[in-house]
Image (spheres, helix red, strand yellow):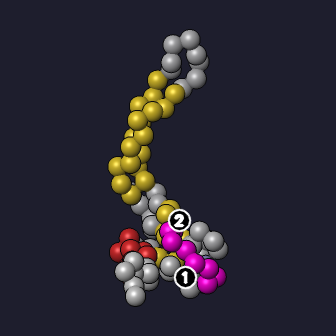
Amino acid sequence: MPKCPKCKKEIDYLTYYAYELTKATVGIPEGTDHMEYSHWDSLGTTKGEVNFECPECSEVLFHTEEEAKKFLLEQQTPLLEE
Ligand SMILES: [Zn+2]
């Protein structure tokens, strides 16, 4: 399992943060007076940087999906290791 270079804890996932443009359907259900949102959809990142953080210590480790993927894949323990 990959280890965080900062806190040295084993992590098998990262926390993703990004500014994304989102789209949803909004209406007021019959008999209520509150706005109800549904059908949330992400239309992609809009601005600023994308952060991939360690879930244990919240250190920003990567800014691109490519780097994050490499980290998660390259240090993965091979399943058929003898
Ligand atoms: Zn960490």
* Image quadrant where one finds the C terminus: bottom left
For the residues labelled 2 and 1, the Cα–Cα distance comes to 14 Å
Residue 18 shown in magenta: no
Q: Is 67 situated left or right of 16 in this image? A: left
- Looking at this view, name the residue that lies furthest to the bottom: 82
Q: Is mark 2 within 8 Å of ligand 1?
A: no
Question: The residue under label 2 is which amino acid type?
Answer: Thr
Question: The residue under label 1 is which amino acid type?
Answer: Lys
- Residue 65: % across, % down: 38, 70
Magenta region: which residues?
A: 6-14
Q: Is 7 situated left or right of 49 in this image? A: right
- Mark 2 vs 1: CB contact within 8 A: no
The correct choice, above or below, for 7 with respect to 31 in the image is below
Q: Quadrant of residue 3?
A: bottom right
Q: Secondary structure at mark 1?
A: loop
Q: Is 31 situated left or right of 43 in this image? A: right
Residue 8 shown in magenta: yes
Q: Which residue is mark 1?
A: 3
Q: Quadrant of residue 24?
A: top left
Magenta region's main secondary structure? loop
Instruction: Tell which of 15 and 46 is nearer to you.
Output: 15
Can residue 71 be seen here? The reply is: no
Q: Secondary structure at mark 2?
A: strand
Q: Quadrant of ligand 1?
A: bottom right
Q: Which residue is mark 2?
A: 15
Residue at the spot 64% in from the left edge and 82% down from the top edge: 7
- Residue 70: % across, % down: 38, 79
Q: Nearer the viewer, mark 2 or mark 1?
A: 1
- Looking at this view, name the residue that lies furthest to the front: 82
- Residue 52: % across, % down: 49, 70
Residue at the spot 41% in from the left edge and 31% down from the top edge: 25
Instruction: Tell which of 66 and 12 is nearer to you.
Output: 12
